[in-house]
Image: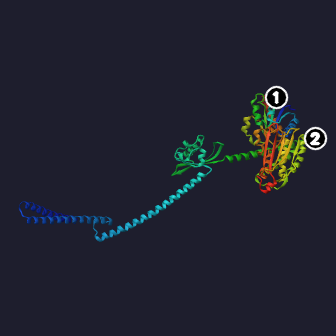
Amino acid sequence: MTGKKVLIADDEIHIIHVVAIKLRNNGYEVIAANNGAEAYELACSEHPDIVVTDYQMPFVTGIELIEKLRKNEATMHIPTILLTARSFAITQEMQDSLGVQECLSKPFSPKELLKTIEDILYQRAVAVKN
Amino acid sequence: MRRQRRLVWAAVAMVMASLCIAALTGLFHSGIGVGWRNHLVAWRLIACCIGAVGVIFLGLAYHRLAGTVASIARQLSGDPAGLMDLQAIERAAQAVQTRLREGQEALRTLETELTDLRIRSQLADRQKQHTEAIIYSLRDAVVVVDEADRLLMANAAAARLFGFDPEQARHKPLAESINPGHEDFVQLIQSSRQSATEATRREMQFARPEGPHTFDTIVSCVFERNQVSGVVAVLHDITREKEVSQMKNDFVSHVSHELKTPLASITAYSEMLADGEADDEQTRKEFYEIIQTQAQRLNRLIEDILNVSRIESGLIKVQKEPVSLTILIEQQMQMIRGFAEEKKITVVGQNPIVYDQVLADKDMISQVIVNLLSNAVKYTPPGGTVRIKTEVNETEEVVRVTVTDTGVGIPADEVAHVFDKFYRVRANNKQASGTGLGLNLVKQIVEKVHDGRVFVTSEVGVGSTFGFELPLAAAELAGTAR
């Protein structure tokens, strides 16, 4: 249906698994990484339409990943969703300064995640058209 | 009256003087032309005159003395006009005596009061010294300055903190005595004094040789007749409290993260099942199994947290009995073998058939052994080997158990932290999941419950050796254990 590419970064294999199934069932292409470093490489090479990342990951954290994406001209415009069990540590100011579109708390609802992705991509498409 | 008396005396003196002059004149003339008889008369006359003059002078002296005494008596008796008679003088003398006694009494009272004051002063001095001794011995730094920010008093803690000698710095401006780096403190005192604030509280950080320290600083103004006469500052070191608070926050943050992670999987897979996202039976079975394993993980995590908490608080029930570590190891090796075989890892035991009994809680030590073995298997790549060895050191009267793997190893800067609560080696995070509580539990059980010790050595890419030592049962029963 959409054909949009979503990059999921999480060190929990089950989270990647369940999100991937949900998104694929809804017509998305899914690429995945176990840590921030791997995710950044994939973002650079695969140019996903949106990135869904965990906060706490080995080597490069979700925050560091987003900062790296924002510094790279090729990836700076990719919208991001932070999916974290530490949502209490993410303030609105932090979210704004990082340019994070949405922050979802774990445990999360795959349905809600799907809707958030759809909304962000829709707004992005409208913005591009205008 | 007095005047008349004086005139009479003067007249008598003048007559006597005239007679004397006449006699002397006669003597003079007789020396020229009269006989020795006339000389005798003249000499007698002169002697009489001299005697008379002497009597007159004595009388005058007596009169003057009596007048003086009477005058004093009149003054003392309140009768300066001299209207009193001799009885009045006596009464006056008595009055003088009474006054004298009263004076002596007042003097004695004053002496008693003076002694009392001296004692009170000594007591006050002692109390002051006592209070100062208390202030000096306080662990909190105390600084007292006057209305011009000159140091009046600083205790030993303040001297250490600000780097000055309180005696040398006394009565000198605080800003001149204090070490550089404490300007904020001087400013706080100045601003408190200027604004005449009764009490100001602020957290201040100062550099110390061992690192920055945080102080809860309370500055209070001292008032005299509505004017600030000085400032008292008390600085309480809250560095440790802040560290503990931070550790608590980290603990809560870590626990919530660790609990939420399996919970997130359970919630997500349950929702997928409920929404019919699992198309076939095999997918549904897979989802159910994931939910089950994540629920078990959650339960294990809660158990681990509770065990660590129980051991730390001393609430855990410990049942120590003589147990053979060789036998416990053998049992735990059987349990871990299935998991090791799945990963194609060989588990080798080298246990001596010697006396190796320790006084231990069997379940707890089994938990220690299984945690070390499962960790070794988790972080060893397929084809590797895990060796478990027991040694008895009779000299030190301990049994030493070591678990050596051919795993990924731990970076040198992280080795010291592997037994910390919730610590996970960052580089090895992707090798296996874990709560970061397993090794902490090992440390707590060995060191806190069994008076043993844990140790670790590791080399990245070569492998790690984790182990523990427990006192031999015989040594512990004999009371000779370390």
Q: Secondary structure at mark 1?
A: helix
The residue closer to the viewer here, B242 or B228, is B242
Do the residues indicated by labels 2 and 1 lie within the same chain of the protein? no
Residue B239 image offset from top left, x and y in percent: 67, 46
Q: Indicate the amino acid at tag 1.
A: Ser
Residue B410 image offset from top left, x and y in percent: 79, 39
Question: Residue lying farthest bottom?
Answer: B87
- Image-based side of B363 in relation to B248, left or right: right
How many marks overall? Answer: 2
Q: How did the renderer colour the structure? A: rainbow
User: Vertical placement of B6 versus B321: above or below?
Assistant: below
Q: Indicate the amino acid at tag 2.
A: Gln
| Quadrant of image for the C terminus of chain A | top right
The residue closer to the viewer here, B139 or B195, is B139
| Quadrant of image for the N terminus of chain A | top right
- Image-based side of B80 in relation to B372, left or right: left
Q: Residues within 10 Å of mark 1 (few under 14, many from 20)?
A: few
**Dot label at residue B282:** 2
- Image-based side of B266 in relation to B52, left or right: right
Chain letter of the residue beneath label 2 in the structure image: B
Quadrant assignment, res B9: bottom left
- Residue beneath label 1, please? A45
